[in-house]
Image (cartoon, rainbow, N blue to C red):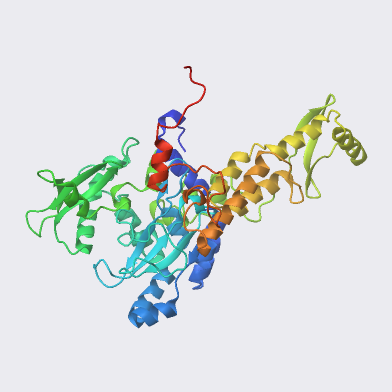
Amino acid sequence: MAPHSANAIPTRLLMWQRVRQYAVPPSMIETATARRAVGDWAGACAAARIDVDLDLRAVRDRHGTDLATRLRADLRRLAPDLLRWHMPRIAPDGRLRPGLTLCLARYGGSGAVAPQLVVRTPPAWADAGQRMSLALWHGSGGRATGQHPHPHPHPDRRFRLDLHRHLWDAARSGDLPRRCGATAAPSGAPPDRATTHGDSWAVARWAAEAERLLRAEGRPRGAFTVRLGARSRAVLELAAPDDSHAPTCRPLPGALPPQRAAALPVLPEAAARVLPDLELLRAGLIAPDGLHPLVAAVLAPAGPPTPYARAAAYGWPAAGAARPADPHRVECRGEVHRIALRDGVLTAIDHDPAQLRREGLLVALGGPALPCLRAIDAVHRDPQALPAVRERLSHGDVAGALDVVEGLLGPKAVLRDGPLREELESAAARRVHHGLFRSGLVSEHPAAAGAGHTEAGHAEPHHRPRVDRRTPLPLRLKRSSRTRPRTGLAG
């Protein structure tokens, strides 16, 4: 890949580069693909850390055999690892967008109450493990088939994949080059300005994608919006001289009232922006072997990537690969000594075991440690691979993080106090919050229920929760008041 200066690479691309490196590990893709190949869609979802909150028998009883048959067919075509690959993410760490209900397929026409297959992400306070869930949203009630509450139960209009089945349907993945703009643009089409580092908007595809959007909404032509930022949106109109001409986008003449603009169809994010994989390939920030196999097969069809090649693209340990045997080398007492794994533990192999026991006792009594022992202690507490462990834990890859730790310290090592142990303990504690959310015991952040409550899931006594939009209005006014007495001021 071509070398790049870190200062010249946009932050967004650096985020997606880390996401492609850590968020969907090769082991997940291989396991999910193997289970999907034999028809085990539920096992494939489990391998991709997706919980299934729907019952096909209950769906059949409530909506009929036809809808249950269509739903079962979609579940068999679902590639959950590919869905995780293309899920919306947030800066700066590239985690899944929290509290999202995203539509994958609609059943029953374009009405707002049509049942929809949705995938959901937990709120930010319960997103440990980066797990998702599948459910069937029934429309009228706002609730999906699932026992735990969700902060945003309705499908999001901006983030939807029912018009982009190639991003999760294994049978439609071949449509990716045409839909993402990787193929040659037709004559007369405007240049795709989204391929530059400074602009990630796929402007050249807006007209074709807007036509699909409006057709799905039952409108042959009309106005739509594109969300450009937190407080910015573009209101465009899809128009053509007649049905024989390709439609084009143009700014809507005149300004619409905010209420009318908010009611217009929203171009999905997957259509508004250029595909991150395409940006990374064109910028030279990723190799084809670093892509998902279904994506690499259509964007860079140079041959199917092997597990070893894809693992080597970013330094991942491939399954069955032998661990490097070259030990660490430390200068100790005027000599160069070796530190390596022996019997499942990182040890100083150039020291006699009896000597190491004596030196360990000396350190326990407050004496100075050998340089070899200091080096081992440093690896236990704050290893150089700690950022890689943090990234894997952040994206829910606990097995991958433990593989890195075992490769450094050995499978029989006992972790010592330090940043490494704190990261692993913190990840385990956050998973408890996710379990409480999934079980329905806690529906919001424990600190958001107000101070002074001691019930399960509420703040403890004398705890001062952070003031945000969840804080009750009286408490918010009291905390923001300037009438409280101040001490330490000169009279």
Position of 305 compared to 177: left or right?
A: right
Horizontally, residue 435 falls left or right of residue 354, namely left
Extreme-top residue of the structure = 490
Number of marks in picture: 0
Question: Could you tell me residue 294's position as x and y percent?
Answer: 44, 58
* Residue farthest along the left direction in this orientation: 241
Give percent across and percent down for residue 108: 27, 73
Location of residue 255 (image quadrant): top left
Picture coordinates of residue 285, whole percent (x, y)? 45, 40
Depicted 376 relative to depicted 134: above or below: above
Question: Would you say residue 328 is visible in this rendering?
Answer: no
Using residue 481 as the reference point, say whether residue 181 is left or right of it: left
Q: Residue furthest front?
A: 491
Near-viewer residue (80 or 110): 110
Figure quadrant of residue 56: bottom left
| Relative depth, front residue between 166 and 392 | 392
Work out whether 51 lies above or below 16.
below
Inspect this view and state whether residue 2 appears.
yes
18 over 41 or under it: above or below: above
Task: Locate residue 128 relative to residue 103 in the image: left or right.
Answer: right
Picture coordinates of residue 78 (x, y %)? 42, 66
Q: Nearer the viewer, residue 77 or 490?
A: 490
